[in-house]
Amino acid sequence: MVRQARGLLLAADGLANAEIARRCEVDADTVRRWRTRFQAEGTAGVGVIAKGRGRKPSLPPGTVEEVLRLTHSERPPDTSTHWSTRSMAARLGIGKDAVAKIWSDHNLKPWRVETFKVSTDPRFEEKLVDVVGLYLNPPARAVVFPYDEKTQCQALDRTQPSLPMKPGRAGTMTHDDKRNGTIDLFAAMNIATGQVLTGLNKGHTGADILRFFKQIDAAVPRALAVHVVLDNLSAHSTPEIKKWLAHRDRRRWHLHFTPTSSSWLNLIERWFKELTDRRLRRGTFTSVTELSEAITTWAEHWNADPKPFIWKATADEIIAKVQRGRESLRQINSQTDH
């Protein structure tokens, strides 16, 4: 359809049939047929295969429907968790490439699985609206900080040196590793600037978290309010933290808790992914000290050219999606109960 439309536009520009054929990689007779059909049928005939023409279907009637039914509702006879092109082809007596084409046409990928969990927090909608509202419409004269801890960052070294990348081969690293200790990373991102405050501790007790809250407090000018988005970890609400927040000097502080099982709602998790993908996963560290220095250096480079993450989804869109998920779970549970 696209090729034919491009050819007709070239014809409208006055190009000869032979030149159109060359540019569209067809023969001149094909271009003539395009022009004749367009003259007779207009845009309705563009890209439409005439009856009796084109490649004839090679699959028995109902094969596509059966592939889709089996993919959605049954498992292979060997009790595998999902179908492969070969197991489906053997089941129906067709080629594996035909199965792959059917899955591609219907955007099905049985070999992939994604994790999820629908929050059961009774205050889910309330907390969601609160946090998303902060992202989409931050308060005036205030700084918003998504905050969390990335616990148990491991100082991993490899058992053998990695081999360098060369033409035709990716860089390599051993599948096993040596563990040289862990460190907990505390991070809070200014959603307006993208700059990140970080802290490294051996644990994440209430005292450790309070120390980092004081770091945030010292970094924000006194004339601005502080809004912190965080999860429901019990260490975030210890008596010492509550006492510190209750002081009149902390009246500018406001905590906004994400719903349970909703870490995706905290923007700092997106920064943790950047850190993991670009520095930690393929890094080698002989000690916790080396790991700490690497994290600190990478964060300093990030802050030299920060890139804020822009939240776009509205609370209504998220709630509608979650409601669909809950309804699907109810239907599955109902079927299971019966």
Image: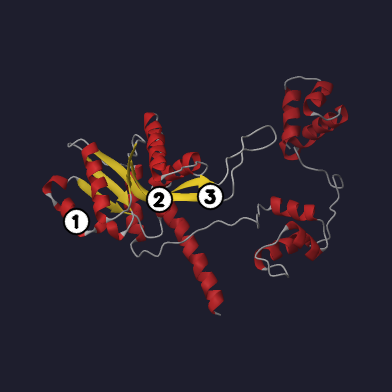
Q: Which residue is mark 1?
A: 240
Label at residue 182: 2
* N-terminal-most mark, 3 or 2: 3
Looking at this view, is 51 or 4 the one in front? 4
Report whether 226 appears left or right of 9.
left
Q: Point out the frontmost of discs 3 and 1.
A: 3
Identified at 36% across, 43% down, the residue is 136
Query: Mark 2 near mark 1, Cβ–Cβ under 8 Å?
Result: no
* N-terminal-most mark, 2 or 1: 2
Quadrant where the N terminus sits is: top right
Q: What residue type is disc 3 on?
A: Asp
Report whether 142 appears left or right of 70.
left
Identified at 84% across, 29% down, the residue is 32
Looking at this view, is 54 or 133 the one in front? 133
The percent coordinates of residue 28 (x first, y second) are 86, 27
Q: What residue type is disc 2 on?
A: Thr
Label 3 and label 1: CA atoms lie apart by 39 Å
Q: Secondary structure at mark 1?
A: helix
Looking at this view, is 173 or 187 the one in front? 173
Q: What residue type is disc 1 on?
A: Glu
Q: Point out the frontmost of discs 2 and 1.
A: 2
